[in-house]
């Protein structure tokens, strides 16, 4: 517990204020990504969380490391690991217990937080050793009951230590973490592009005051203003990925883009995905706001699967019949009963 207090000492409890949600009639800027370098990545890694280990934790090391959490896939155990992304060399590796599906991960101080699917459980590890950090005898804590049911993506504001959690909806949940590891729900932020809610938000990354988010099933990244939830830009990878047929969209929602990492010192921006053989270092380019093709590409970036939060075509490409979703109240009751 003492080590956890030290690692989280800079991030006690914070409050967060919001301003009124605003919308705009001007087109959302579109950035056409270009690939600077294609680095190797494990084609068996079902990437769910991705980010840089900050330079202050690495000391004098000139080697930039990323952390990566991977979900359960076929006979692969869910993992949390540290990688040299330039060579795909695994520096440290830890398997999670069987039966868990690792989701998003984020760095707060010197602690890696790892969410799990269909569970309010969050695991904690010392960032540079992956040593489990005990809280009341275990390295797990719980998401607050009034917050998300589970985490898909996690990211952290490095200035305040506030954690932002996606759960596949169009909302981000803001969580504060005390020095003892207790989580408190601060607020919910509705993410929207103009008047359109942007649902199925997945992996998240903090980039110079904005939240970059993957959208499930789309080869685009949306840029979110955390104070209001406004989408202030989209990054399209449609052109960049034409040379790489084994990544991007497919009929099983596998090989999807799902990993963003940003080093604020070098300004290196990486993207990768589930079962991708590459991690790409990218440049966003200059924003484009006009032209019919721009409108088409923006439309392609927004979620295309049919869902109304009461019913959904669960399955691929909306080809299966509608089935009824359980209500949020039923889901919450089920999850809270297991806590």
Image (cartoon, helix red, strand yellow):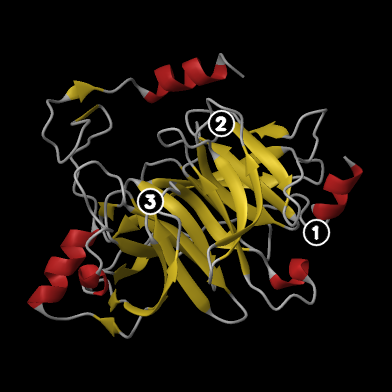
Could you tell which of marks 1 and 2 lies nearer the N-terminus? 1
SS at mark 2 in the image? loop
**Image quadrant where residue 21 sits:** bottom left
- Rendered residue at 54%/73% (across/down): 208
**Image quadrant where residue 247 sits:** bottom left
Task: Report the Cα–Cα distance between label 3 and label 1.
Answer: 36 Å
Could you tell which of marks 2 and 3 lies nearer the N-terminus? 2
Q: Nearer the viewer, residue 210 or 221?
A: 221
Viewer can see residue 143: no
Relative placement, left or right, of 316 versus 211 is left
Q: Quadrant of the N terminus?
A: top right
Q: Position of residue 7 (x, y in %)?
A: 81, 54
Q: Position of residue 90 (x, y in %)?
A: 60, 57
Q: Check disc 1 and report the residue beneath it.
A: 10
- Do the CB atoms of the residues marked 2 and 3 lie less than 8 Å apart? no
Task: Please tell me whether mark 1 or mark 2 is closer to you in this view.
Answer: 1
Q: Check disc 2 and report the residue beneath it.
A: 146
Q: Residue furthest left?
A: 292
Task: Report the Cα–Cα distance between label 1 and label 2.
Answer: 25 Å
- Do the CB atoms of the residues marked 1 and 2 lie less than 8 Å apart? no
Q: Check disc 3 and report the residue beneath it.
A: 275
Relative placement, left or right, of 61 versus 154 is right
- Do the CB atoms of the residues marked 3 and 1 lie less than 8 Å apart? no
Q: Compared to 49, does 96 lie above or below?
A: above
SS at mark 3 in the image? loop
Q: Position of residue 204 (x, y in %)?
A: 48, 56
- Rendered residue at 30%/77% (across/down): 31
């Amino acid at each position: 517990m003492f080590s956890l207090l030290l690692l989280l000492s800079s991030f006690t409890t914070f409050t967060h204020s919001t301003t009124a949600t605003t919308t705009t009639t001007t087109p959302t800027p579109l950035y056409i990504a270009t690939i600077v370098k294609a680095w190797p990545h494990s084609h068996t890694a079902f990437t769910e969380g991705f980010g840089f280990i900050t330079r202050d934790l690495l000391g004098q090391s000139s080697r930039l490391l990323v952390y990566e959490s991977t979900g359960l896939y076929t006979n692969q155990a869910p993992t949390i690991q540290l990688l040299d992304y330039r060579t795909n060399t695994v520096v440290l590796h830890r398997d999670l217990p069987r039966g868990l599906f690792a989701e998003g991960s984020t760095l707060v101080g010197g602690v890696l937080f790892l969410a799990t699917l269909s569970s309010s459980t969050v695991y904690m590890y010392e960032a540079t050793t992956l040593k489990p950090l005990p809280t009341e005898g275990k390295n797990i804590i719980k998401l607050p009951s009034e917050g998300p049911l589970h985490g898909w993506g996690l990211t952290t504001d490095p200035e305040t230590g506030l954690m932002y959690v996606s759960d596949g909806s169009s909302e981000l949940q803001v969580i504060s973490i005390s020095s003892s590891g207790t989580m408190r729900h601060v607020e919910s932020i509705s993410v929207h592009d103009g008047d359109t809610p942007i649902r199925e938000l997945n992996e998240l990354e903090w980039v110079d005051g904005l939240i970059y988010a993957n959208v499930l099933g789309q080869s685009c990244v949306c840029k979110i203003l955390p104070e209001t939830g406004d989408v202030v830009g989209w990054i399209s990878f449609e052109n960049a990925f034409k040379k790489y047929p084994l990544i991007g969209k497919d009929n099983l929602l596998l090989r999807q883009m799902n990993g963003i990492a940003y080093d604020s010192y070098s300004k290196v921006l990486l993207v990768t995905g589930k079962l991708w053989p590459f991690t790409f270092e990218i440049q966003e380019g200059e924003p484009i706001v006009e032209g019919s093709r721009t409108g088409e590409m923006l439309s392609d970036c927004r979620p295309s699967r049919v869902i109304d939060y009461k019913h959904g075509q669960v399955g691929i490409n909306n080809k299966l019949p509608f089935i009824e979703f359980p209500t949020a109240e039923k889901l919450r009751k089920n999850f809270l009963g297991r806590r």
